[in-house]
Image (cartoon, rainbow, N blue to C red):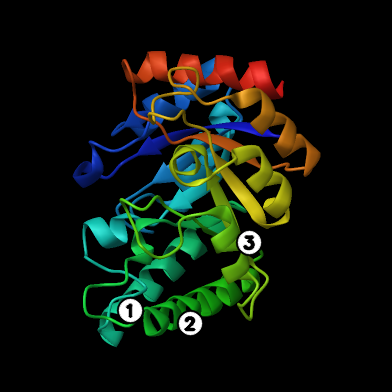
Amino acid sequence: MIKSCVTIALVPQIKTGPWIFWENLEAGMEKASKLGFDAIELFTPSADAIEIPRLKELLAQHKLELAAVGTGAGKVIHGLTLTNPDPTVRQKAISFISDMIDFGAAFGAPAIIGSIQGNVLPGNDREETMSWLAEGLNQLGKHAESKGVTLIYEPLNRYETNILNTIEAGSKFMETLETNSVKLLADLFHMNIEEGNLEESILNWGKYIGHVHFADSNRRPMGFGHTSMREIAEALKTVRYSGYASAEAFPYPNPDAAAEQTIEEFRKWFA
Protein backbone atom coordinates (compact mmCIF):
# COMPACT_ATOMS: atom_id res chain seq x y z
CA MET A 1 0.00 0.00 0.00
CA ILE A 2 1.32 3.42 -0.96
CA LYS A 3 1.41 5.83 1.98
CA SER A 4 1.02 9.61 2.13
CA CYS A 5 3.77 11.95 3.27
CA VAL A 6 4.36 15.68 3.58
CA THR A 7 7.66 17.55 3.80
CA ILE A 8 8.86 19.68 6.71
CA ALA A 9 12.04 21.76 6.33
CA LEU A 10 13.97 23.20 9.27
CA VAL A 11 16.87 24.68 7.28
CA PRO A 12 16.54 28.48 6.88
CA GLN A 13 19.02 28.55 3.99
CA ILE A 14 16.63 26.55 1.77
CA LYS A 15 13.43 28.39 2.63
CA THR A 16 12.71 29.18 -1.03
CA GLY A 17 12.70 25.48 -1.88
CA PRO A 18 9.88 22.99 -2.52
CA TRP A 19 8.78 22.05 0.98
CA ILE A 20 5.25 22.30 2.32
CA PHE A 21 5.81 23.14 5.98
CA TRP A 22 8.58 25.33 7.40
CA GLU A 23 10.42 26.11 10.62
CA ASN A 24 7.93 24.89 13.24
CA LEU A 25 8.26 21.12 13.50
CA GLU A 26 5.50 20.56 16.04
CA ALA A 27 3.01 22.79 14.21
CA GLY A 28 3.75 21.06 10.92
CA MET A 29 3.33 17.63 12.47
CA GLU A 30 0.06 18.62 14.09
CA LYS A 31 -1.33 19.86 10.77
CA ALA A 32 -0.10 16.77 8.93
CA SER A 33 -1.76 14.53 11.47
CA LYS A 34 -5.09 16.36 11.37
CA LEU A 35 -5.18 16.11 7.58
CA GLY A 36 -4.57 12.36 7.76
CA PHE A 37 -1.02 12.07 6.40
CA ASP A 38 0.79 8.85 7.24
CA ALA A 39 4.25 10.37 7.57
CA ILE A 40 6.59 13.32 7.32
CA GLU A 41 9.80 13.73 5.32
CA LEU A 42 12.23 15.84 7.29
CA PHE A 43 14.99 18.24 6.26
CA THR A 44 17.29 19.33 9.10
CA PRO A 45 20.57 21.29 9.29
CA SER A 46 22.36 18.26 10.76
CA ALA A 47 21.82 14.82 12.24
CA ASP A 48 21.85 16.21 15.77
CA ALA A 49 19.51 19.16 15.16
CA ILE A 50 16.66 17.24 16.80
CA GLU A 51 17.03 14.89 19.73
CA ILE A 52 15.93 11.40 18.71
CA PRO A 53 13.85 10.72 21.87
CA ARG A 54 11.99 14.01 21.37
CA LEU A 55 11.21 13.24 17.72
CA LYS A 56 10.03 9.75 18.66
CA GLU A 57 7.74 11.31 21.24
CA LEU A 58 6.29 13.76 18.72
CA LEU A 59 5.79 11.10 16.06
CA ALA A 60 3.95 8.88 18.53
CA GLN A 61 1.87 11.79 19.77
CA HIS A 62 0.71 12.69 16.27
CA LYS A 63 0.51 9.10 15.01
CA LEU A 64 2.99 9.76 12.21
CA GLU A 65 5.97 7.90 10.77
CA LEU A 66 9.25 9.33 9.56
CA ALA A 67 9.41 8.49 5.86
CA ALA A 68 12.88 9.82 5.02
CA VAL A 69 15.49 12.43 5.92
CA GLY A 70 17.14 14.83 3.49
CA THR A 71 20.87 15.51 3.27
CA GLY A 72 20.77 18.72 1.22
CA ALA A 73 21.98 20.84 4.13
CA GLY A 74 25.38 19.24 3.64
CA LYS A 75 25.71 21.05 0.34
CA VAL A 76 23.72 24.20 1.10
CA ILE A 77 25.38 24.97 4.43
CA HIS A 78 28.78 23.30 4.12
CA GLY A 79 29.37 23.09 0.35
CA LEU A 80 29.85 19.32 0.43
CA THR A 81 29.29 16.94 -2.50
CA LEU A 82 30.15 13.34 -3.29
CA THR A 83 31.78 14.40 -6.57
CA ASN A 84 34.02 17.25 -5.46
CA PRO A 85 37.53 16.88 -6.93
CA ASP A 86 38.96 17.37 -3.43
CA PRO A 87 39.02 13.99 -1.62
CA THR A 88 38.82 15.76 1.75
CA VAL A 89 35.52 17.38 0.74
CA ARG A 90 34.18 14.07 -0.57
CA GLN A 91 35.04 12.36 2.72
CA LYS A 92 33.31 15.11 4.67
CA ALA A 93 30.24 14.61 2.48
CA ILE A 94 30.30 10.88 3.22
CA SER A 95 30.61 11.60 6.94
CA PHE A 96 27.70 14.07 6.85
CA ILE A 97 25.49 11.60 4.99
CA SER A 98 26.55 8.74 7.28
CA ASP A 99 25.40 10.75 10.28
CA MET A 100 22.06 11.39 8.56
CA ILE A 101 21.75 7.66 7.83
CA ASP A 102 22.26 6.95 11.53
CA PHE A 103 19.66 9.56 12.46
CA GLY A 104 17.06 8.21 10.04
CA ALA A 105 17.81 4.60 10.93
CA ALA A 106 16.63 5.25 14.49
CA PHE A 107 13.17 5.48 12.91
CA GLY A 108 13.64 2.93 10.12
CA ALA A 109 13.82 5.82 7.63
CA PRO A 110 16.27 6.16 4.72
CA ALA A 111 18.44 9.18 3.94
CA ILE A 112 18.04 10.85 0.55
CA ILE A 113 20.95 11.92 -1.66
CA GLY A 114 19.79 14.77 -3.88
CA SER A 115 21.80 17.94 -4.44
CA ILE A 116 24.72 16.64 -2.37
CA GLN A 117 25.57 14.31 -5.27
CA GLY A 118 27.11 17.33 -7.02
CA ASN A 119 28.07 17.74 -10.69
CA VAL A 120 30.74 16.96 -13.23
CA LEU A 121 32.57 20.27 -12.90
CA PRO A 122 34.00 22.13 -15.91
CA GLY A 123 37.39 20.72 -16.80
CA ASN A 124 36.83 17.51 -14.86
CA ASP A 125 36.71 14.04 -16.39
CA ARG A 126 33.22 12.55 -16.36
CA GLU A 127 34.38 8.97 -15.90
CA GLU A 128 36.49 9.93 -12.90
CA THR A 129 33.62 11.93 -11.40
CA MET A 130 31.29 8.96 -11.77
CA SER A 131 33.87 6.75 -10.05
CA TRP A 132 33.83 9.15 -7.09
CA LEU A 133 30.04 8.94 -6.98
CA ALA A 134 30.14 5.15 -7.13
CA GLU A 135 32.74 5.04 -4.38
CA GLY A 136 30.59 7.21 -2.13
CA LEU A 137 27.36 5.33 -2.83
CA ASN A 138 29.03 1.97 -2.27
CA GLN A 139 30.37 3.06 1.10
CA LEU A 140 27.13 4.73 2.14
CA GLY A 141 24.91 1.93 0.85
CA LYS A 142 26.84 -0.61 2.90
CA HIS A 143 26.61 1.65 5.95
CA ALA A 144 22.85 2.00 5.46
CA GLU A 145 22.51 -1.77 5.17
CA SER A 146 24.39 -2.22 8.45
CA LYS A 147 21.80 0.05 10.06
CA GLY A 148 18.85 -1.85 8.60
CA VAL A 149 17.77 0.81 6.09
CA THR A 150 18.25 1.67 2.45
CA LEU A 151 19.85 4.74 0.91
CA ILE A 152 17.84 6.76 -1.60
CA TYR A 153 19.52 8.32 -4.65
CA GLU A 154 17.62 10.95 -6.61
CA PRO A 155 18.13 11.59 -10.34
CA LEU A 156 17.70 15.34 -10.77
CA ASN A 157 16.80 17.30 -13.88
CA ARG A 158 19.47 18.70 -16.21
CA TYR A 159 19.23 22.20 -14.72
CA GLU A 160 20.29 20.89 -11.30
CA THR A 161 22.88 18.25 -12.17
CA ASN A 162 24.70 16.84 -15.20
CA ILE A 163 25.29 13.46 -13.57
CA LEU A 164 22.21 11.20 -13.85
CA ASN A 165 18.92 12.70 -15.00
CA THR A 166 16.56 9.82 -15.71
CA ILE A 167 15.24 6.77 -13.90
CA GLU A 168 16.79 4.57 -16.59
CA ALA A 169 20.22 6.18 -16.20
CA GLY A 170 19.95 5.93 -12.44
CA SER A 171 18.88 2.28 -12.58
CA LYS A 172 21.73 1.29 -14.89
CA PHE A 173 24.17 3.04 -12.58
CA MET A 174 22.70 1.21 -9.57
CA GLU A 175 23.44 -2.05 -11.39
CA THR A 176 27.15 -1.21 -11.39
CA LEU A 177 27.37 -0.71 -7.62
CA GLU A 178 28.75 -3.23 -5.17
CA THR A 179 25.77 -2.70 -2.85
CA ASN A 180 22.09 -3.53 -3.36
CA SER A 181 21.01 -1.13 -0.63
CA VAL A 182 20.78 1.98 -2.81
CA LYS A 183 17.34 2.66 -4.29
CA LEU A 184 16.07 5.42 -6.55
CA LEU A 185 13.83 8.36 -5.84
CA ALA A 186 11.25 8.87 -8.57
CA ASP A 187 10.57 12.60 -8.34
CA LEU A 188 7.62 13.32 -10.60
CA PHE A 189 8.68 16.95 -11.09
CA HIS A 190 12.14 15.99 -12.35
CA MET A 191 10.65 13.15 -14.38
CA ASN A 192 8.26 15.57 -16.13
CA ILE A 193 11.33 17.38 -17.45
CA GLU A 194 13.54 14.42 -18.34
CA GLU A 195 11.43 11.34 -19.08
CA GLY A 196 9.90 10.68 -22.48
CA ASN A 197 7.13 8.69 -20.81
CA LEU A 198 6.76 8.65 -17.02
CA GLU A 199 4.56 5.57 -16.96
CA GLU A 200 6.98 3.51 -19.08
CA SER A 201 9.96 4.56 -16.98
CA ILE A 202 8.21 3.37 -13.82
CA LEU A 203 7.11 0.11 -15.44
CA ASN A 204 10.56 -0.60 -16.87
CA TRP A 205 12.63 0.33 -13.81
CA GLY A 206 10.17 0.09 -10.95
CA LYS A 207 12.18 -2.50 -9.03
CA TYR A 208 14.79 0.18 -8.31
CA ILE A 209 12.33 2.77 -6.96
CA GLY A 210 12.40 3.20 -3.19
CA HIS A 211 10.72 6.58 -2.73
CA VAL A 212 8.44 8.90 -4.72
CA HIS A 213 8.21 12.69 -4.64
CA PHE A 214 4.60 13.63 -5.32
CA ALA A 215 4.67 17.03 -7.06
CA ASP A 216 3.16 18.36 -10.26
CA SER A 217 4.93 19.45 -13.45
CA ASN A 218 5.43 23.00 -12.13
CA ARG A 219 6.51 21.71 -8.70
CA ARG A 220 3.32 22.96 -7.14
CA PRO A 221 1.17 20.43 -5.27
CA MET A 222 -0.26 17.69 -7.46
CA GLY A 223 -3.31 18.89 -9.35
CA PHE A 224 -1.95 22.39 -9.97
CA GLY A 225 0.03 21.45 -13.11
CA HIS A 226 -0.36 19.20 -16.15
CA THR A 227 0.93 15.86 -14.85
CA SER A 228 -1.34 13.00 -15.90
CA MET A 229 -1.54 11.06 -12.65
CA ARG A 230 -3.87 8.27 -13.73
CA GLU A 231 -1.22 6.41 -15.75
CA ILE A 232 1.50 7.10 -13.16
CA ALA A 233 -0.64 5.80 -10.30
CA GLU A 234 -1.48 2.66 -12.25
CA ALA A 235 2.18 2.09 -13.11
CA LEU A 236 3.23 2.40 -9.45
CA LYS A 237 0.56 -0.12 -8.49
CA THR A 238 1.60 -2.45 -11.30
CA VAL A 239 5.22 -2.56 -10.09
CA ARG A 240 3.89 -3.05 -6.54
CA TYR A 241 5.49 0.05 -5.16
CA SER A 242 4.62 0.18 -1.47
CA GLY A 243 6.57 3.17 -0.19
CA TYR A 244 5.65 6.80 0.33
CA ALA A 245 4.31 9.44 -2.04
CA SER A 246 5.88 12.48 -0.45
CA ALA A 247 4.93 16.06 -1.25
CA GLU A 248 8.21 17.79 -2.08
CA ALA A 249 6.37 20.70 -3.63
CA PHE A 250 6.19 24.46 -3.29
CA PRO A 251 3.79 25.59 -0.55
CA TYR A 252 1.40 27.08 -3.12
CA PRO A 253 -0.70 29.10 -2.54
CA ASN A 254 0.26 28.69 1.13
CA PRO A 255 1.42 25.76 3.29
CA ASP A 256 -1.98 24.80 4.65
CA ALA A 257 -3.70 24.92 1.26
CA ALA A 258 -0.81 23.03 -0.33
CA ALA A 259 -1.06 20.26 2.26
CA GLU A 260 -4.83 20.02 1.79
CA GLN A 261 -4.47 19.85 -1.99
CA THR A 262 -1.82 17.14 -1.66
CA ILE A 263 -3.85 14.85 0.60
CA GLU A 264 -6.92 15.26 -1.63
CA GLU A 265 -4.91 14.26 -4.69
CA PHE A 266 -3.25 11.41 -2.84
CA ARG A 267 -6.62 9.96 -1.84
CA LYS A 268 -7.90 10.40 -5.38
CA TRP A 269 -5.15 8.23 -6.84
CA PHE A 270 -3.98 5.94 -4.07
CA ALA A 271 -6.74 5.54 -1.46
Labels 3 and 1: the sequence-earlier one: 1
| Secondary structure at numbered mark 1 | helix
Residue sitting at x 44%, y 30%:
217
Disc 1 designates what residue?
Answer: 90
Q: Name the residue under label 3.
A: 149
The residue type indicated by label 2 comes to Glu
Relative to 200, say whether 228 is above or below: above
Local crowd at mark 2 within 10 Å, few (<14), some, or many (≥20)? some
Task: Bin the neighbour count of mark 1 within 10 Å (Cα to Cα): few under 14, some 14-19, many 20 and up.
Answer: many
Q: Which of marks 2 and 1 is nearer the N terminus?
A: 1
Of 29 and 13, which appears nearest the observer? 13
Residue 260 location in percent, x, y?
A: 48, 14
Residue 213 falls left or right of residue 123 = right
Residue 246 percent coordinates (x, y): 53, 36
Marks 2/1 in contact by CB < 8 Å: the verdict is yes
Residue at x 57% of width, y 18% of height? 265
Which residue type carries mark 3?
Val
Nearest the eye: 170 or 69? 170
- Judged from the image, the secondary structure of the residue bearing numbered disc 2 is helix
Q: Which residue is drawn at 57% across and 54% down?
A: 167
Cα distance between the residues tagged 3 and 1: 22 Å
The reply, left or right, for residue 135 in relation to residue 204 is left
Cβ–Cβ under 8 Å for marks 3 and 1: no
